[in-house]
Structure formats: structure tokens, C-alpha cells
Image: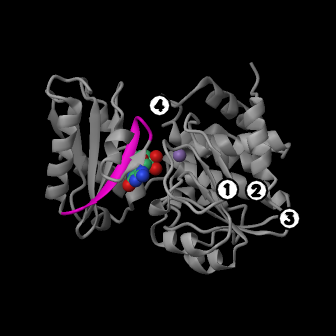
Amino acid sequence: MPFVLSPDRLEAARAFAATFQPGQRVCLTTHVNPDGDGLGSEAGLAHLLKARGVDVVVTNPTATPPRFDFLFEDLPGLDKTREAVKELRRADRIVVLDIADLGRLGMLGETVRSRGVPVACIDHHVGTGVLPEGPRYLDSDAAATGELVFELAVANGWPVDQAVARGLYVAILTDTGGFRFSNTRPRTLRVAAELLETGVDPEEIYLEVYARAPEGRPRLFAEALQTLVVEPDHGLAWVTVPPGAIERLGVSSDDLDGVVEFPRSIEGVRMALLFREVSQGRVKVSLRSIGPVDVAAFAKQFGGGGHTKAAGLALAGSLGEVQATVLAAARDYLGGDGRNP
Ligand code: 5GP
Ligand code: MN
């Protein structure tokens, strides 16, 4: 079966695209600590909009991790993250990718909220948060926001060349954990196949994204994995980043990508967690699940969110305090008898 769009998605994608005009100044932005999906979707959409005469820049709340710099190599000067606030103040419209909540835009949230220009959104997270008015293209069944950008291109007859495809392939590759997670639908692989048809080299992309890590990354993994705690009775396992380890090893929080898969990989574990102090008195928790446990719903009670099987939250408090609170809630959530209520 080829890749097809249902009539209502086709209409939604065309209505969304019709709001972009040549000559418009458009800022693309994504969530704090941008990942392969946010950045790959931005790079893909930037190429698509540039080809339509739109004056597009990328303005993210935090810096692009070095392993994703290659996405912007053929878009010189387009990543204006360092001057994000200034750029947002000049924009005719803003497009928020891979999140639908001002609270995840970090220091840019207030500027985006108060700008008074349309704020478009392309996203695949469960449930929506608060964003100013603007066109939406949403689908929580999509594996990645990159899949939705591909739909926009196809629905509007925008040519997907190799440059566009590279960004969208990175988006899908990273958000599906290399096509392993449950969000990998037949449709996802059809999109990936069409992207490869453009001549994108999957090994080259694999090497850029996963095989150019600093030495500190495996050392950080080693330190984090040393902290592993497993509670077989609850189906819980967690690891903690030793405070200061990221700075000491000269790496960034992006280098933690994948570490939570280790507690998740243990037989009998149904919820895996990664705890990390992001600043004095603020702790970020990454959540992953196996089976029917819904970690997005769990995260929501603490103001977090994400997807059914991959979610996150951030809480005020010391590492010890946040661990105690979240783990107690997790034990409760999973139920002493080992079943999710
Ligand atoms: P990660 O744990 O890899 O940072 O994030 C997993 C998923 O949860 C991603 O889809 C991410 O957008 C979402 N997520 C992570 N942290 C938060 C958070 O603090 N709030 C919300 N709403 N979503 C989060
Ligand atoms: Mn995503």
C-alpha cells in the first residue's frame, strides 16, 4: 500500500499550509533541550518554506546539540537561536514544532505568548497545553513531528528533495528509537521509505547522530548506570545522574539520550525513570514504560506530559525530595500487586 492521506487530513494539511505567504518572516521554534525530532522537523520545514519564498529562521529556547549541527549546514545563518527573542519580536508568525505548550518553550514562552502574531503548531504529543491562537496540524498517533511535516509537503504538492528528507528522516529515526518503539507504525516506515527514495543515506545519518559522541558520553552512562536501583515487586527501576557529572565530563544533557533504556530493558520492569538535577532546586524526570502503563498520564499529575510510553516532568525540590515524591507516586500508580490500576 503506498503512502496516502485521508480526505480530512488532506484538507487539514492544505488549510494549514494556506496560511503561509511568500515574503512572510516566520520563526520556527521547539521545546527546550531540542531533540532530533524538533530539530529535524525544523530543518525539513525550513527547506520547504524557503522554497515557497518564506523568510524563515529557527529560534529555539536552548542551543542545538553539536550532533545535530549537520542539519543546518546547508541552511547557513538560519539557526538564530542565540538571538531568539530579537528574532521573535520581528516575526510575522511563529511555528511551534514538537510541543503544544508555552511552558515547554523555556525563556521564550513569555515572548511567544505576548507577541500578538499567529502561533501555528505542528505536534504529536498527547493532549495539548496552552498556546496563542493560530493554525494547528496535530496527530498524537504520528511517531514523530517529522512525519506530520512530510504529510504537509505531500498534501500540498511541495517537492521533498534530499535536503528536506534528511531532516525528516532524523526526526523519525530518533523519535522511534531507530524504528524500535511502539510508535513505529506501518505508515511510519512508508514515510521513511519515501524519504530514503530521495537518496538520503541512512548510514551517513546514523553516523552523524549516533557515532560522533564525545568521550564523556559513555563515561556519563557509566556513572549514571552505577546508581541503578530495581524494585522487582513494583516493576520499577531508576537511575540518577550524579550531580555535577555533566559539567565535569564536558558533555550536555543531550548526551543522556538513551540512558533510560537500560533500566527499561530489565525483565519485569514496567516503569523506568531517570532523575537529573537541571539547576539548583529543580529536578527533571524522564519516564519510560513497558506494556500498558501510561507514563504521560502519570507525568500529568506533576504538570509534565509526553507520550503514553515516553514522558517527562520537572519538579522543584532537591534530588532526594523529588525522588521520594515521584517514586512513592509511581509505586502507588503501578499498584503493589503489579498491575496498573
Ligand atoms: P525525555 O524524557 O526524552 O526528555 O522526553 C520524553 C517525552 O516526554 C518527550 O516527548 C518530551 O517532549 C516529553 N517531556 C519531557 N519532559 C517534559 C516536561 O517537563 N513536560 C512535558 N509536558 N513533557 C515533557
Ligand atoms: Mn517528537
Q: Main secondary structure of the magenta part?
A: strand
User: For the residues marked 4 and 2, what is the alpha-carbon distance in whole angstroms?
Assistant: 28 Å
Specify start and end residues of the magenta stretch as a single range: 307-317
User: For the residues marked 1 and 2, what is the alpha-carbon distance in whole angstroms?
Assistant: 6 Å
Residue type for callout 1: Ala
| Numbered mark located on residue 181 in the image | 4
Residue type for callout 2: His
User: For the residues marked 4 and 3, what is the alpha-carbon distance in whole angstroms?
Assistant: 38 Å
| Precedes in sequence: disc 1 or disc 4 | 1
| Numbered mark located on residue 43 in the image | 1
Residue 79 lies in the magenta-colored region: no
Image location of residue 203, percent across then percent down: 61, 39
Callout 3: SS: loop
Answer yes or no: disc 2 within 8 Å of ligand 2.
no
Callout 4: SS: loop
**Pointers 4 and 3 in contact (C-beta within 8 Å):** no
Residue type for callout 3: Pro
**Pointers 2 and 3 in contact (C-beta within 8 Å):** no
Residue type for callout 4: Phe
Is the residue marked by circle 2 packed among few (<14), some (14-19), or many (20+) residues within 10 Å?
Answer: many
| Numbered mark located on residue 22 in the image | 3
Q: Which quadrant holds residue 49? A: bottom right
| Precedes in sequence: disc 4 or disc 2 | 2
